[in-house]
Image: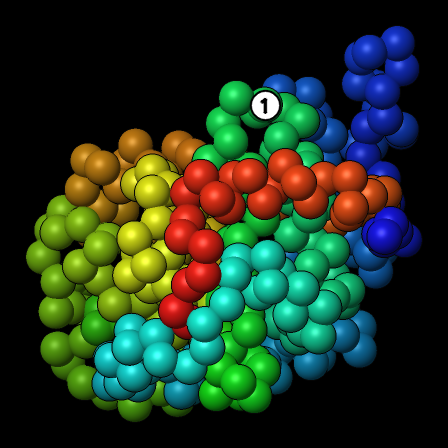
């Protein structure tokens, strides 16, 4: 099986060296080339440009921001930490994502399995010795199976999109922030201070994040005793936490371990976002490598 995504391509290799396809492409660390535009011809994560897709994205975020309350998140975590819905392998879950499209993403409307392999292979090329990061890239979005019937068929607003803490003030850097005024928590004084129900440098593991695929996959990995390093679990749980890793918000809640792990998240985020480009991937060729990583860091079958 070969995957082809018809989108702008980042740097190619000539004589063993990466070169830019055009002078507008941005140069990243370790030779990674970030494309100048997404598959719709717009800047990446541009939520203001007028387009049919952007209108749908804004509607998505309004619903998300109204419904993601502290009590809702607590309820979802208590329900899904049971991991009593399905038993299957990591690769079986990867294949399920062929049925998922993320409506919150302004840059991509392809099935998720394509994005997973793009991200993983791009990181593998630049960080060949960090096999845990390759696997983290492959599995970081697997929690989107929450959209499927076997996992509860949750609405998009409860599965995808940018994540953020609940139980404290909503930061202005969060996309479409204006809609939080319609969230019931906005009227609860205890949830509307800088620290809310938390304390300074308490650690992000103590913070309730808006519910979605990030937190679910984090729970799946943790509860199934994955041996991924702390940084891998951190990337899985916070890769959609753009208010933190793009805007620097909520750092007052981080402890020292969070600060170290954030360095890896910023590396990962570049590939997660900008690898949405034209890349040919022979799935059968790379599959044995990723199966070996799954065997190394996870049990054969997992509870979901």
Q: Position of residue 144 (x, y in %)?
A: 55, 70
- Using the rendered view, name the quadrant where residue 125 is placed: top right
Residue at 69% across, 80% down: 56
Which residue is the extreme one toward the top? 15
**In the displayed image of the protein, which residue is found farthest to the left?**
199
Left or right: residue 180 compared with residue 275: left
Q: In the rendering, at what x and y percent does residue 52 appear?
A: 80, 78
Q: Nearer the viewer, residue 259 or 92?
A: 92
Tell me which residue sits at (30%, 83%) in the image.
79
Res. 265 visible in picture:
no
Where residue 191 appears, x then y in whole percent? 19, 76
* Front in this rendered view, residue 118 or 73: 118
Tag 1 secondary structure: loop
Instruction: Name above or below for residue 260 compared with residue 167.
Output: above
Q: Is residue 148 above or below residue 227?
A: below
Q: Is residue 171 above or below residue 151?
A: above
- Give coordinates of residue 120: x percent, y percent: 63, 41
Could you tell whether 97 is left or right of 2 in the image? left
Q: Tell me the quarter of the image containing the C terminus.
A: bottom left
Residue at image x 59%, y 57%?
91
Q: On the image, numbered disc 1 is attached to which residue?
A: 128
Residue at (45%, 72%) from the top-left corner? 87
Q: Is residue 281 left or right of residue 287?
A: right
Residue 228, can we see it?
yes
Q: For the residue carrying disc 1, how many other residues have a C-alpha within 10 Å: few (<14), some (14-19), or many (20+)?
A: few
- The answer to which of 4 and 91 lies nearer the viewer is 91
């Amino acid at each position: 099986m070969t995957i082809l995504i018809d989108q702008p391509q980042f740097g190619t290799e000539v004589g063993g060296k990466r070169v830019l396809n055009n002078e507008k492409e941005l140069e990243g660390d370790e030779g990674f080339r970030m494309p100048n535009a997404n598959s719709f011809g717009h800047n990446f994560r541009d939520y203001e440009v007028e387009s049919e897709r952007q209108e749908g994205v804004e509607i998505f975020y309004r619903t998300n921001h109204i419904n993601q309350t502290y009590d809702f998140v607590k309820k979802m975590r208590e329900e899904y930490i049971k991991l009593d819905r399905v038993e299957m392998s990591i690769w079986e879950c990867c294949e399920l994502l062929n049925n998922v499209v993320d409506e919150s993403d302004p840059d991509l409307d392809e099935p998720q399995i394509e994005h997973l392999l793009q991200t993983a292979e791009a990181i593998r090329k630049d960080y060949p010795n960090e096999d845990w990061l390759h696997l983290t890239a492959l599995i970081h979005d697997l929690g989107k199976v929450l959209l499927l019937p076997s996992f509860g068929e949750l609405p998009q607003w409860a599965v995808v999109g940018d994540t953020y803490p609940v139980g404290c003030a909503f930061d202005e850097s969060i996309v479409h922030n204006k809609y939080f005024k319609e969230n019931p928590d906005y009227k609860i004084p205890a949830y509307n201070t800088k620290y809310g129900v938390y304390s300074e440098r308490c650690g992000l593991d103590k913070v309730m994040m808006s519910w979605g695929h990030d937190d679910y996959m984090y729970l799946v990995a943790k509860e199934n005793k994955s041996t991924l390093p702390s940084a891998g679990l951190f990337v899985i749980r916070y890769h959609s936490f753009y208010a933190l890793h793009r805007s620097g918000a909520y750092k007052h809640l981080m402890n020292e371990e969070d600060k170290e792990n954030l360095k890896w998240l910023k590396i990962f985020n570049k590939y997660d976002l900008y690898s949405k480009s034209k890349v040919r991937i022979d799935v059968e060729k790379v599959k044995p490598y990723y199966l070996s990583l799954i065997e190394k860091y996870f049990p054969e079958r997992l509870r979901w």
